[in-house]
Image (cartoon, grey):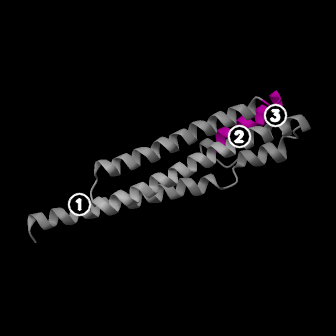
Amino acid sequence: MSFARGLLITLVLSVLAAFAGAWGGASYIVSRMHDEPPLHEVVHEKLNLTADQERRIAGLERDFAARRQALESEMRAANAELAQAIGREHAYSPAVQQAIDRFHRAMGQLQKETILHVLAMRQVLTPDQAAVFDDTVVKALTDETP
């Protein structure tokens, strides 16, 4: 096998591996976002919220759901852009890097929005409720079962 052919095969396999890794990672993240988080269960089933707290948190959740949906759509669009760039260029090109960066920006913004949402919900709680809430947040962020 010639050096050029070996280099081409290595390049193609590298691009395919990068695409598979990006696609797999994105799919995993998006699928985890749709699972019912333990925090949601704690807030709505274990904190004994007052009617006013329920109303305020429902408003926060509606607002966050819209922002989350927009950012998840952006992540899907970035993945589609990545697939097109790889399919078109078969190399780790500027277009591939741009699509990856686009996905990471949307994912990072979603993480920031999620933390802001969690902190906004916390402001609605009493100190005793907040202690249970905080424990659940810490466990969720460290992958410990609440």
Callout count: 3
Q: Name which residue type carries label 3.
A: Gln
Which marked residue is nearer to the observer: mark 1 or mark 3?
A: 1
Q: What amino acid type is highlighted by mark number 2?
A: Asp
Q: Are marks 1 and 3 in contact (CB under 8 Å)?
A: no
Q: Which residues are magenta?
A: 124-140
The amino acid type of the residue labelled 1 equals: Leu
Looking at the rendered image, the disc whose residue lies closer to the viewer, 3 or 2, is 2
Quote the CA–CA distance across marks 3 and 2.
22 Å
User: Is residue 99 rendered magenta in the image?
Assistant: no
Instruction: Work out whether 129 lies above or below 20.
Output: above
* Left-right relation of 105 to 42: left
Q: Secondary structure at mark 3?
A: helix
Disc nearer the start of the sequence (2/1)? 1
- Sequence-first disc among 1 and 3: 1
Q: What's the residue at 74%, 42% (across, down)? A: 61
Q: Residue at x 33, y 59 (%)?
A: 86
The answer to which of 93 and 108 lies nearer the viewer is 93
Residue 106 appears at what percent x and percent y? 51, 43
Query: In percent of the image, x 62 and y 49: which residue is there?
Result: 69
Residue 134 counted in the magenta span:
yes
Q: Which residue is mark 1?
A: 11
Image disc number at residue 63: 2
Query: Label 1 vs label 3: CA separation?
Result: 54 Å
Q: Position of residue 15 (x, y in %)?
A: 30, 59
Return the residue at label 3: 129
